[in-house]
Structures are given as C-alpha cells and as structure tokens.
Image (cartoon, coloured by chain):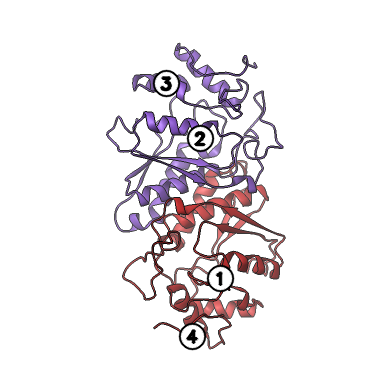
Chain colours: A purple, B red
Amino acid sequence: MARADGWQCHALTVDYGQRHSAELEAAARVARSLGAVEHRLARVDLGVFGGSALTDPGIPVPRKPTEGIPITYVPARNTVFLALALAHAEVTQSDAVFTGVNAVDYSGYPDCRPEFMEAFERLANLATKRAVEGSPIRIHAPIVRLSKAEIVRKGLALGVDFALTVSCYNADAQGRACNACDACRFRRAGFQEAGIPDPTRYAASPVR
Amino acid sequence: MARADGWQCHALTVDYGQRHSAELEAAARVARSLGAVEHRLARVDLGVFGGSALTDPGIPVPRKPTEGIPITYVPARNTVFLALALAHAEVTQSDAVFTGVNAVDYSGYPDCRPEFMEAFERLANLATKRAVEGSPIRIHAPIVRLSKAEIVRKGLALGVDFALTVSCYNADAQGRACNACDACRFRRAGFQEAGIPDPTRYAASPVR
C-alpha cells in the first residue's frame, strides 16, 4: 500500500528472539518482491524478559483460542518495534513509518490498536532530532481497521504473492504453518471469507 | 531516589552497541551497591542504524562543544530504552519505571525532556496488557529538572559512591573518562559547582 501510494520503502525486520526464523526469511523475500530500496535486520533479545509463548521456548503456543489477551502477547513488543522503526526512519530521512498491525480479526493485543498508534506518533515527534528541527514523522497503520478478508482482497488487487508470506507463530523448519495457532486461524478464515484460494503451506490439517 | 522512596528495584542496563563497555560494568557495580533485587542486561544493536558518534566507530566523539543537537545524539535511543524498560516492568509486575534522564545541564537531546517522558507514559498505558487490565505503569524521571550540581548533592546525601559510576562517552579500556566530551564537561562542572571533590578517574587533563 505504501509503494502504491508512491513511497520509496526502506524495509525493516526485527529478530527479537521469536520461536522461528521462517518469518525473517519471508520478510526478506517480501521486501525483494515489493521493490524495497533496502532491507535491514535489527536484533533485540526480548527473550531476556520472557513472559510470552513467542519468546520463551518453555511456554507452548496455544492450539486453541483462549480467554482474554493470550500468552502469545509479547510484553511491549510493538513499542520496541516502532522505536526501532523510528530510529530507522530518522537515519534514512524518511517521512513516515508504515506498520501492518491490525485490530479487527486479532488477538486483542493492546499494542495493535489505533489509539496506541496515535500515541506513538505523538511520542515520535517529541523524541527525535528530526522532529524538533521541524520535520515530523507520521505513523501509518493502513490495515489496522480492515478485516482479514479485506486485507486479502486488497493485497491481491495490489499483486501481493501471499505464498511468500508467513503469519504462523509456530512455523516449522521448512517455513510451513502449524494450522492451529491464532495467527493461522485468523489468516485461514480471511482467505475463506474472501472466497480466495489459500496459498499457505500448512504442515497439518486445521485444528478446530 | 527510588530505593529511598521504598521501591524494590529491578535494574536494567542496555547494551546497544555503544563505543565502550565501561558503562555496562559500572551499571553492574551500581546495581549491586544500591541493593537492586535483580539486574538484567538487554541487548539491541542500534549500530545497524548508525548515524551517531556513540554507535558508529567511524564518527569521532567531539572534544569540544558543538552547535545544536550534537552528533552524539543516537536516533530514537531513549524511546528504545524505555520500550525495553516497559517490557521489563511488565514481566516483573513493577508499578513504575525510573529513568535518570536530565534536561538541565545537557546536550539538548529531545528524548531527555519532561514532555517526552509524559508522552511515553501515556503510550505505556495504551501499550501493555497490564495497563489495559487496570494496572497502569508510571514513568518517573526524578532528576530531569535538577542541575548537575543538585544531582551531585542529592546523590551524596543518599550515600551514592560516584566513583562507581561512568558518564563518559569515550571511556578507555580501564574505564577512565576522556575529560573532553560533553558528558565529561557537564559532570566535572557539576562537582565543581557543588563544591565537592570529583572522584572520577580521568585518563587526561580537561580539554577546555
């Protein structure tokens, strides 16, 4: 969506100690396929804090929906991600940060909501040399209010090859999705609702 | 100051790719001497972004004051630090984050100012599971409005051994301060103005 709006994109991926590297490899493929002018990998070890199934190998990823905010919530993760993106934006003299968070078909993570993004934009413009010198940085979350089905349709209209992407929390060494975690459920339902064949490589039949 | 107010302190140090490890060793000494209940080291590589004399070994630390926000500014550094502290606070069930930023005798870094801290607190309470479930996290910057002389006096009154601490941007392998960078200038002037002997181990005479 940023490219279609004419932005030159400096892609950023964060290796934060997640359970698998499949999404890091997928990010590199996607950045290449979308014509990013560069792709950087930032490393931060959130495993030192633990407290989440995504950063503590001792906590299993749930294979069924759970009550409330699930154990896959990573404390302050999107705050850390956006802080790194802000650093990246400042050094590349970028005018905006785009993030793919979504608060419609989602797990209730607080740091995916529009009000969080608005508060981060306000912070960004008090935090940076660039902003205090008169060039603010906007935070865009263009899919935050779309359903997963709308995201699928929008992506296809823009020529996204969803076979390149990984959403699963628990992908295997070959990058195949578990078909059981919340991320797999929401993604699969999005393709179904959109009436579009799901190109995801699954390691197993769906767990319902 | 947090300890004197009765807080149990979970200390956090960030290895972000700074020029020297002297401040990491000093942080461990200080955390021990102040009776922190734990001390964690979080690693994040801000060197991948560069753009600062503190993270790019190819950019020298200025040995004289410069105009405007100096090249020792690290893009979005305190946003990254506070984001990590927020993760740490959430997993340790802490009610507050304390940070030692100062906006009086300082280099004009935008992310040291009270308005930045207030915006971060607002963000923190939209960002975390803990906050949306009813337990907000406060951000305290107890020395943000003190002069360096006031900080020195306050520290001594509380029994701080300043010989354990490192402020220098460019400390040598023995942890000795360069006596030329802005951080050394502000610190030295603080002891002078307070009329208190400066226990800092310097590698050289002051550059004026």
| Position above or below: A126 against A60 | below
Amino acid type at circle 3 is Glu
In whole angstroms, how far apart are the C-alphas of marks 3 and 2?
Answer: 25 Å
According to the picture, the residue beneath numbered tag 3 turns out to be: A150
Instruction: Read off the residue under disc 2.
Output: A24
B197 versus B145 height, above or below:
below
Depth check, mark 1 against mark 3: the one in front is: 1
Residue type marked 1: Ala
Label 1: which residue?
B173
Residue at image mark 4? B193
Measure the C-alpha gap from mark 1 to mark 3: 56 Å
- Please name the residue shown 70% across and 70% down the image: B33
Quadrant of residue A85 in the image? top left
Q: Can you name the residue that lies furthest to the left here?
A: A6
Q: Quadrant of residue A195?
A: top left
Q: Residue at x 54, y 66 (%)?
A: B100
User: Which is more foreground, mark 4 or mark 1?
Assistant: 1
Q: Residues within 10 Å of mark 3 (few under 14, many from 20)?
A: some
Image coordinates for residue B138, horizontal then vertical, percent: 58, 55
User: Do discs 1 and 3 belong to a common subunit?
Assistant: no
**Which quadrant would the N terminus of chain A be assigned to in this image?**
top left
Mark 3–mark 4 Cα distance, whole angstroms, equals 63 Å
The residue tagged with tag 3: helix, strand or loop? Answer: helix
Give the mark toward the camera: 3 or 2: 2
Residue A144 is at least partly visible in this image = no
Whole-angstrom CA distance, mark 2 to mark 1, is: 36 Å
Left/right placement of residue B108 relative to residue A20 reads: left
Q: Nearer the viewer, residue A13 or A152?
A: A13
Task: Looking at the picture, tell me which residue is in the foreground, A48 or B6.
Answer: A48
The local crowd at label 4, few if under 14, some if 14 to 19, many if 20 or more residues have their Cα within 10 Å, is some
